[in-house]
Structures are given as C-alpha cells and as structure tokens.
Image: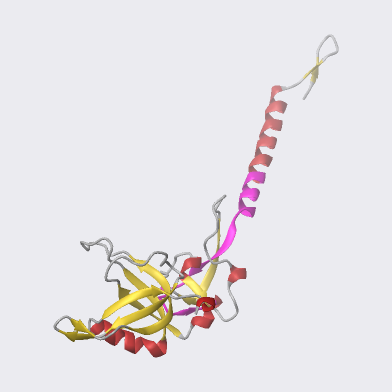
C-alpha cells in the first residue's frame, strides 16, 4: 500500500503498478478475443459427399463459424439457403465448406450433368454459367457426316475441366447441365463419336 515518507509525499508501491498493468492487459485480451468471435461468419459444411445433380437441404448441412478477415465470403451462408434446398453442380466432399460456385437454384432439378470433351479450343467467352447450344453432326463413315444440327439447345456450363496430361492443352472437357429428356440423345452421340461442338447461345433479343 502507499507509504508516506518523512517529507509527507506519497510513495507508490511497485506491486500496485504491476497489478494495474496485469488487469489492463487481461481486459484487452478478453476484448480482442470477443471481437475476433464477432468477426466470424456462419457458413455451411457438408455432412456427406454430394455429387452433381444431388439436392441439398438444411438437414444435410451443419453450421460452422469461420473467420475470413477481409476476404470475400464465397461459401454458402444460412440465410442464402432456400427452403427447397439447392442443386449441387460440382462435387462437394464430406466435411468441406459449401462453395457458392458448387450449388445452384433448385428449379434446375430437372437437369442432369453430362461431361462433353471439346474437340479443340473452346469458343471465346465460354465459361462457367455460359449458356451454349450443343451442335452434333452424325458420323456416316469414310470421313463423311450429316449436316450439323442442334442436339441440345441452351445447355448451361456447370464447370470446365482441364485435360490434365493430354498433349493438346486446348482440349478440355465441359460439364453441362442438360435437360433430362435430352440426356439419352447426347450420350448416344458421344458413344457414336459424332462430331460435337459447343456454340454460345444467342440472347432472345437477337433471335
């Protein structure tokens, strides 16, 4: 405790100063911890592995708090999940955060995913979310083929897959969202090795 010297001045005990410093430091540490928790964002984690075409609902997910700092949140948040769920467009593995790029609106539940290998470089502007017409020319043999026709109109590009070890770096595969009633025809054309090309679909106003 403070002690009075012979001249009447007060001498502060160093232990008192140390105690005050410890209290201030402890308070600052608690404040920092609480502030850090407040900065965390609630996002969904998959409870199992989901493949393209699957439908995920709230019961299939758990909420985790993650700190992203100044980075833009690109994962599914609880308030972004509609009551009817979302359609999976690319594989989400068990325990992973659910990327926004891997899910889409449930009104696409009538679609199926089909991977189509490209015959060369993709047309400029074709990327995830691009709407394309799938053109096919049936092979007749001896290098001849029928005139090309639109096999699947307005298919949406779900993902573009790099060719990996293929020699031609321009050759990639495209994962398409295709109406289920057109899947059989597209798979048949692929099995027959018909010539298939993807052409960006024209907007309605230009048709």
Which residue is rendered at x = 59% and y = 59% of the image? 41
Residue at point 53% right, 69% down?
62
Q: Is residue 53 within the magenta segment?
A: yes
Q: Nearer the viewer, residue 43 or 207?
A: 207
In this view, the residue in front, 173 or 95, is 173
Image quadrant of residue 201? Answer: bottom left
Left or right of 116 in this view: 1: right
> Residue 129's x, y, as percent?
46, 70
- Looking at the image, is 58 positioned above or below residue 41? below
Left or right, 155 with reference to 71: left
Q: Which colouring convention does the figure follow?
A: secondary structure
Task: Report if residue 98 is visible in the image.
Answer: no
Q: Which residue lies furthest to the right in this view?
A: 8
- Viewed as shown, does residue 145 lie left or right of 129? left
The x, y position of residue 73, in whole percent, is: 55, 58
Q: In this view, does 135 lie to the left or right of 48?
A: left
Whole-percent x, y for residue 170 in the image: 28, 62
148 up-or-down from 13: above or below = below
Among the 4 quarters of the image, the one containing residue 58: bottom right
Q: Position of residue 21 (x, y in %)?
A: 68, 31
Q: In the image shown, does 77 or 115 lie closer to the viewer?
A: 115
58 in magenta: no
> Can residue 197 be seen in the rendering of this structure?
yes
Q: What stretch is highlighted in magenta?
A: 31-57
Q: Of all residues shown, which one is farthest toward the left?
A: 142
- Residue 175 falls in image quadrant: bottom left
- Figure quadrant of the N terminus: top right
- Total residue callouts: 0
The one of 61 and 113 positioned closer to us in this rendering: 113
């Amino acid at each position: 405790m403070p002690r009075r010297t012979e001249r009447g001045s007060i001498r502060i005990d160093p232990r008192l100063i140390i105690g005050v410093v410890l209290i201030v430091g402890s308070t600052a540490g608690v404040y920092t911890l609480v502030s850090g928790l407040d900065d965390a964002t609630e996002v969904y984690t998959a409870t199992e592995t989901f493949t393209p075409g699957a439908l995920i609902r709230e019961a299939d997910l758990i909420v985790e708090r993650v700190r992203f700092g100044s980075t833009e949140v690109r994962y599914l948040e609880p308030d972004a999940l509609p009551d009817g769920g979302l359609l999976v467009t690319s594989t989400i593995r068990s325990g992973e955060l659910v990327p926004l790029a891997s899910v889409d609106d449930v009104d696409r539940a009538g679609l199926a995913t089909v991977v189509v290998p490209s015959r060369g470089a993709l047309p400029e502007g074709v990327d995830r979310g691009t709407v394309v017409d799938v053109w096919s020319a049936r092979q007749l043999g001896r290098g001849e083929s029928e005139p090309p026709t639109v096999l699947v109109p307005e298919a949406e590009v779900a993902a573009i897959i790099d060719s990996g070890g293929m020699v031609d770096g321009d050759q990639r595969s495209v994962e398409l969202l295709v109406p289920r009633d057109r899947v059989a025809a597209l798979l048949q054309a692929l099995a027959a090795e018909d010539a298939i090309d993807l052409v960006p679909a024209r907007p309605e106003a230009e048709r």
